[in-house]
Image (cartoon, helix red, strand yellow):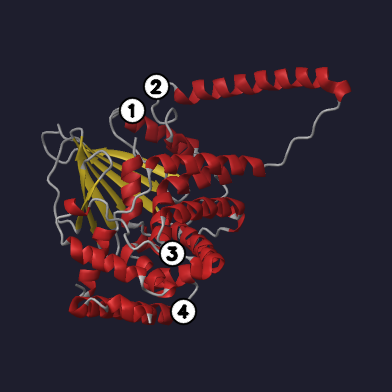
């Protein structure tokens, strides 16, 4: 059964069909969140004599915070699909000037899906639109998520039509049933697939500049979580 | 991921990316779902508690696997000889696999009869495909020890399977 290491890889790959039960996955997260909340220091109770004063202060604070949050969202999310989505948390360390350019570019392509989480803090983003053929009907959108300190990079390249995937080391089925093609070399790891008329390629290429290369399962999880 | 994210946000991100990987590591190592789920919860809770000590230069996945390994070792210690490894690992849909189900059952059984340290290195190296350096970080072993143990583990698996193929007595011999 195991004549070479490859046989072992293949056998274990088949055995590795252990997946977390989705319900259990959420249960654990709920329980974990509760435990995490319990770790926060408890608030001091106000003395009875100050109850009304505390209540008034709380109402004022809620109003001030509410107005602040409302103003912030009005200012930042007008017509934007970025700040309204989960990716906002991912990009919160990105300078506002970079964010504005990024959002302006991506507003033209509201269908494009973006990762909601990455295993590094994103401190810089860019999105560039190119026309790879002379007809200019096809667009290629080149998106970078980077950490300028650690040199981690995730590149997302999207073509506005489907394409044939070239060489792949492995075919992976995403949660929605889409076939994705994984390939890897010394400097980069890539996952590509066609979805809703677009061709997506996500590439981890930080290795050549000193950042970390994301592995196959991380790329698969990123693809599954894109929105 | 660093101080720009709150620990809660960071752990939520890591959970969505790596909870399944931690589960697979624990499931292969411990042999049952229930203990593996406990390891997942404890690993991410510990990660939250020690978030401030996480150095960005370590890969988040390796860091989590290292925490998971400590919890797995705790299980080994607590349960000692009472521990039961379920050898029917992940074979519910074996008929759909298009491969020889007997071979998979044999491999699953063989894994169940490996010593814990051999199984650990097999899981990290051949299931998670970590490099020798990454395995060394997770297991807190030297690279040489990882290479040697991986080599011996593969040979042991091969022995178990070939003995079993010949006379069906491989597992009895291992037990002795």
Near mark 2 (Cα within 10 A), the count class, few <14, some 14-19 or many ≥20, is: few
Q: CA distance from mark 1 to mark 4?
A: 50 Å
State left or right for residue A11 relative to residue A215. Answer: left
Q: Are marks 3 and 2 in contact (CB under 8 Å)?
A: no
Report the chain holding disc 3: B
Towards the viewer: A53 or B81: B81
Do marks 4 and 2 share a subunit? Answer: no
What residue is shown with label 2? A79
Residue at disc 1, secondary structure: helix
Near mark 1 (Cα within 10 A), the count class, few <14, some 14-19 or many ≥20, is: some
What residue is shown with label 1? A107
State left or right for residue A10 relative to residue B62. Answer: left
What residue is shown with label 4? B142
Residue at the image position 27 percent from the left and 55 percent from the top: B91
Residue at the image position 53 percent from the left and 65 percent from the top: B79
Q: In this rendering, does residue B166 appear at all?
A: yes
Q: Does residue B63 sit above or below A5 in this rendering? A: above
Q: CA distance from mark 4 to mark 3?
A: 29 Å
Residue B50: x percent and y percent? Answer: 60, 55
Q: Are marks 1 and 2 in contact (CB under 8 Å)?
A: yes
- Disc marking residue B84: 3
Tag in front: 4 or 2: 4
Q: CA distance from mark 3 to mark 2?
A: 57 Å
Tag in front: 1 or 3: 3
Q: In this rendering, does residue A122 appear at all?
A: no
Residue B116: x percent and y percent? Answer: 43, 72
Residue at disc 3, secondary structure: loop
């Amino acid at each position: 059964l195991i004549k070479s290491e490859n046989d072992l890889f293949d056998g274990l790959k088949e055995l590795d069909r252990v997946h977390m039960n989705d319900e259990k996955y959420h249960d654990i997260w709920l329980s974990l969140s509760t435990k995490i909340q319990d770790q926060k220091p408890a608030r001091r109770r106000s003395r009875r004599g100050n109850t009304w004063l505390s209540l008034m202060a709380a109402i004022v604070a809620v109003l001030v915070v509410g107005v602040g949050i409302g103003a912030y969202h009005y200012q930042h999310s007008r017509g934007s699909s970025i700040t309204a989505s989960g990716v906002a948390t991912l990009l919160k360390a990105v300078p506002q000037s970079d964010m504005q350019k990024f959002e302006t570019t991506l507003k033209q392509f509201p269908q494009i899906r973006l990762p909601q989480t990455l295993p590094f803090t994103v401190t810089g983003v860019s999105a560039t639109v190119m026309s790879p053929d002379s007809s200019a009907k096809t667009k290629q959108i080149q998106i970078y998520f980077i950490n300028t300190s650690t040199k981690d990079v995730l590149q997302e390249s999207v073509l506005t039509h489907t394409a044939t995937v070239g060489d792949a080391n492995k075919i992976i089925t995403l949660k929605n049933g889409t076939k994705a093609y994984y390939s890897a070399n010394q400097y980069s790891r890539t996952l590509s697939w066609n979805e809703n008329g677009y061709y997506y390629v996500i590439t981890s290429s930080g290795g050549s500049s000193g950042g970390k290369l994301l592995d196959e399962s991380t790329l698969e999880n990123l693809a599954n979580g894109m929105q | 991921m660093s101080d720009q994210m709150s620990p809660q946000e960071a752990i939520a991100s890591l959970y969505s990316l790596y909870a399944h990987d931690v589960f697979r590591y624990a499931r292969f190592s411990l042999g049952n779902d229930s203990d593996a789920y406990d390891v997942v919860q404890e690993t991410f809770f510990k990660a939250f508690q020690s978030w401030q000590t996480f150095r960005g230069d370590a890969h988040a996945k390796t860091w989590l696997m290292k925490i998971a390994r400590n919890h797995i070792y705790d299980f080994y210690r607590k349960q000692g000889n009472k521990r039961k490894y379920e050898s029917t690992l992940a074979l519910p849909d074996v008929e759909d696999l298009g491969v020889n189900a007997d071979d998979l059952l044999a491999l699953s059984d063989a894994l169940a009869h490996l010593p814990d340290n051999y199984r650990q290195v097999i899981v990290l190296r051949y299931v998670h495909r970590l490099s020798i350096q990454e395995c060394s970080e997770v297991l807190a072993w030297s690279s040489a020890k990882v290479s040697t143990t991986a080599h011996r583990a593969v040979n042991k698996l091969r022995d178990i399977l070939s003995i079993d193929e010949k006379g069906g007595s491989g597992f009895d011999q291992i037990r002795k």
